[in-house]
Image: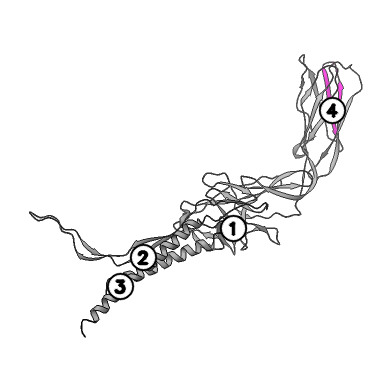
Amino acid sequence: MLRSLYSGISGLRAHQTMLDVTGNNIANVNTAGFKSSTTQFQDTLSQMTQGASAPQGESGGSNPAQIGLGVRVAGVSTNFAQGSSQSTGRATDMMISGDGFFVTSKGGQQLFTRAGSMTFDANSQLVSPDGGILQGWTADQTGVVNQGGAIGNITLNPNTMIANATSKVTLDGNLPSDAAVGSPDLQRVVKVYDATGAARDVTLTFSKTATGWSAAGSDANGATASVTLNQNPDGTLTPSGPFQLGAGASAITVDLSKVSGYATMNSLTVAGQNGAAVGKLESFTLGNDGSLIGSFSNGTKQVLAKIALAKFTNPAGLEKAGGSSYVATANSGNVQLGAAGDPGIGTLAGGSLEMSNVDLSQEFTNLIVAQRGFQANARIITTSDEVLQELTQLKR
């Protein structure tokens, strides 16, 4: 039989594969995070009819004569170019600007995806549309994330409550330097909180002395403290030491650095304190570094978790696992975990999704190329058949 018949068959198969890949690209033109694929062809083994010979004496050398036996699909490569951004306004939609991947866990298998359309399930876990649980690091009670620890499921419980213990009280304003010694004391009362959110009053008393002012503090728990404020000629006050009520984790430092000692004016005020009563989680936002920052009813904002992102030495070596997800292979390299902003990973944007990177104009052109290639190879088969028909008709 003619070799051209089999070459034509291989061409039909290869261009059919190209049509399949192109059709899949077009079908996923609106799939969030989808990455298009490209078919790559290469020729098959060629049959040697004459070997090469070297020049000898007065005879020149000859080149090899080979007849090709067709074409085959060398591979289907994935294009990981960045897709366009689509704003959705949903807090749980996320987009990676860079080369990183979201990490999800489904059925105990670790998967990687570029599709950031997440929702909450019945267990308050952030999950992908196919049920993969988003992975990351959960913050401790103080909002600190241990990025060096193992990753796990990200859960944002709507019943999460926190209370911030007061560790610092800040005063501002002026204590009159020309006040008489023995004049009525100045008192300021500020409400502070313990670690459970329980409130108590701290009373700060300022008494005029010959060298400046003396400050004393006390709270409902019986903690006391005192410090001397020495008057300087330029109107500033110099504390004799730290002004701190209590000790250990419950200690409260009174910041007097903004208090001045000019004449006449009495404008001493409590500028603020950093504690808060108990508050319930109301909403969350996504930071560019992948931190999920909760907003609580007491006005506190605190990091609740941090999203883990992955990168690979060779992303094209990843294997598609369905559901817009990938799994690592021997040629993708080991997964390297990090966070948004780390080198080679990229940043995160909330309220947006990455669209498919399919270029319809290119795909429709590929359709034409694949169709014409299929037709041309079909013509090889029909032409070879006509030649065989002529041969069979030599004997009548």
Residue lying at 75% horizontally and 43% vertically, measured from the top left = 300
- Residue that carries the numbered disc 4 in the rendered image: 216
Contact between marks 4 and 1 (CB within 8 A): the answer is no
Q: Which mark is residue 383?
A: 3
Q: Please name the residue that numbered disc 2 is placed on.
A: 72
Q: Main secondary structure of the magenta part?
A: strand
**Given contact means CB atoms under 8 Å apart, are the residues at marks 2 and 4 in contact?**
no
Gap in Å between the C-alphas at discs 4 and 1?
A: 56 Å
Q: Nearer the viewer, residue 174 or 354?
A: 354
Task: Indicate the position of residue 390 as horizontal and vertical percent values.
Answer: 25, 78
- Comparing 71 with 97, the one in front is 71
Three-letter residue code for mark 4: Ala
Q: Nearer the viewer, mark 2 or mark 4?
A: 2
* Of residues 110 and 58, the one drawn nearer to the viewer in this rendering: 58
Scheme of colours in the image: one colour
Region rendered in magenta: 206-218
Residue type pointed to by label 3: Thr
- Where does label 1 land, which residue? 104
Report if the CB atoms under discs 3 and 4 are less than 8 Å apart: no
Pinpoint residue 142: horizontal percent, then vertical percent: 71, 44
The outermost residue toward the bottom is 396
